[in-house]
Amino acid sequence: MSTRDILLPDCMIFFKSTLLLFLVIFMGPKENMKPHVVSYIESYKFVAIDEMVRSGIPASITMAQAILESNGGVSTLARESNNHFGIKCKSYWTGGAHYHPDDDRDAKGNLIPSCFRKYDSVFSSYADHSDFLMNSPHYQPLFVYDKTEYELWAKGLQLCGYASDPAYADKLIRTVKLYNLHELDYYTIQYIAPSALTSQGDMGASQK
């Protein structure tokens, strides 16, 4: 038996294994858009754009964070406290509070309810999210990025400790790409009067 005859089966096994890996990675099931998330984006995309104009935070990032943190507006925290960004009370918070289990533990390591901010409306949650990032010193480095650099913002939010999930940046980026949220970052004017936005947002909040 020649050396060629010995090596050929091994080469074929390697080729088939590589081909299978390629098929799994590139031809596996694609993540689909969720109808309730699409509806959520339609309800609040102009709010995110208004906040981008006011703060410089990409609308895509604001929307992606809201989608992840509130599960597209249907999480318990979002429905019961209008908190769509998972922002906790902090010692200086003087507004309403909502206690919900998260990742806080007592001295013995037991999980205890965390204090989350409670808002009168979804719009207040969006505005406070912008204020929270703008006024917290450890998020200031993010504001050197342009509003169209959503990937840098996503990675920066993770590095600055916005969430404990080590895959947070990747999830934000995937969400932006899946729902084409980056298109919102190129809006530079307000397309809806604030009164119309308020009416739409209050209606959306009351249905949750």
Image (cartoon, helix red, strand yellow):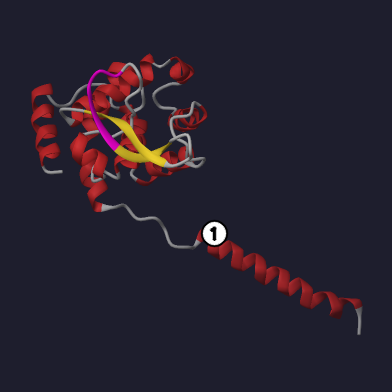
Disc 1 secondary structure class: helix
The part of the chain drawn in magenta is: 93-99
Give the labeled residue for mark 1. 25
The residue depicted at 91 percent of the width and 85 percent of the height is 1
Of the pair 161 and 61, the residue shown nearer to us: 161
The reply to whether residue 42 is visible in this rendering is no
Q: Judge left or right: residue 75 versus residue 90.
A: left
Q: Judge left or right: residue 202 versus residue 114.
A: left
Residue 187, percent from left and from top: 28, 26
Q: Residue 25 sits in which quadrant?
A: bottom right
Of the pair 133 and 11, the residue shown nearer to us: 133
Residue 44, percent from left and from top: 21, 34
The residue depicted at 60 percent of the width and 68 percent of the height is 20
Report the amino acid beneath label 1.
Ile
* Residue 94 sits inside the magenta stretch: yes
* Residue 2 sits inside the magenta stretch: no
Above or below, 57 relative to 104 = above
Residue 176, percent from left and from top: 38, 40
The residue depicted at 30 percent of the width and 39 percent of the height is 100
How crowded is the residue under tag 1: few (<14 C-alpha within 10 Å), some, or many (20+)?
few
Residue 10, percent from left and from top: 78, 74
Q: Residue 114 sits in which quadrant?
A: top left
